[in-house]
Image: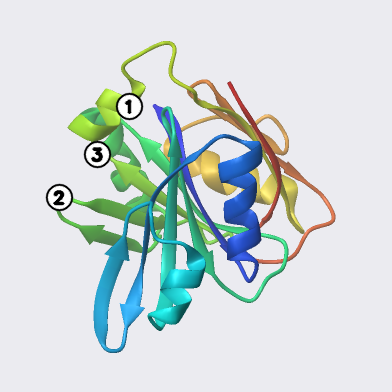
Amino acid sequence: MHLFHYHLVTRKVRLVEARYLGRLGFDLIARYGWIGEGTHWFEPGKSWEELDAMGFRLRLVELGRGAVNVVLQPGHWEVPRVDHLGVALDEEGYEEALDRASALGLKIQDHPGKRTFISTDAGYRLEVHPPRDWIEAALDSDDELRIAELRLRSDDPEGKAAALARVLGLEPDGPAVTIGGSLVSFEDGGPEGRPELVGEALG
């Protein structure tokens, strides 16, 4: 079980993107969006100024470094909020997570061959994956960068942690859950619904 992905929503996408590219050393994978009515995506090499001149409207920015994948989505919030966390599981763990979610009456959105989303009923979702070659390749080397810790702020830290643990069959430690080698910790003083990103430790 590995936490390898998190999806953030913020109205300051370009500023947050610059932080990941500059300070944290991530690579830009692509920017996805629309020009007119058509969908388009652009790999590195096109500046924001060029995209603006083309009338590009952003849907998502995808960034990566080592075994860590981050997606940024335009939204209402200045401080980035987590829409979902991405977890890679083995085949048995994947099926068990779906069974637990179903037994809990949680909403499951399956996109065959791509990804499966599970609502936690705590304001954010999980994106769960069975074994995938591209995830396994990213996680294969012990030298690859991974998520050591995600620190999130919410209105109900222990409730947010318990909701995450229930789906994955884990035991929370108060307001924190360990997913493989990654700690997801929730702090008090945040909003209802999607938790705010306080910070991350990568290593």
Q: Amino acid at mark 2?
A: Gly
Residue 137 falls left or right of residue 149: left
Front residue of this view, candidates 95 and 116: 116
Q: Are marks 2 and 3 in contact (CB under 8 Å)?
A: no
- Rendered location of residue 44, percent (x, y): 38, 51
Rounded to the nearest angstrom, the CA distance separating label 2 from label 1 is 18 Å
Instruction: Name the disc covering residue 138, or none.
Output: 1
Q: Earlier in the sequence, mark 2 or mark 1?
A: 2
Looking at the image, the residue that sits furthest to the left is 113
The residue sitting at 82% across, 50% down in the picture is 188
Q: Amino acid at mark 3?
A: Glu
Residue 35 higher or lower than 175, as above or below: below
Residue 35 falls left or right of residue 75: left
Looking at the image, the residue that sits furthest to the bottom is 36
Front residue of this view, candidates 201 and 130: 201
The residue sitting at 72% across, 68% down in the picture is 78
Quarter in which the N terminus is drawn:
top left
Q: Which residue is mark 2?
A: 113
Q: Are marks 1 and 3 in contact (CB under 8 Å)?
A: no
Q: Secondary structure at mark 1?
A: helix
Q: Secondary structure at mark 2?
A: loop
- Rendered location of residue 132, percent (x, y): 21, 34
Q: Which residue is mark 3?
A: 95
Q: Secondary structure at mark 3?
A: helix
Front residue of this view, candidates 47 and 27: 47
Rounded to the nearest angstrom, the CA distance separating label 1 from label 3 is 22 Å
Graded by Cα atoms within 10 Å as few (under 14), some (14 to 19) or many (20 or more), the crowding at tag 3 reads some
Rounded to the nearest angstrom, the CA distance separating label 2 from label 3 is 14 Å
- Rendered location of residue 47, percent (x, y): 46, 62
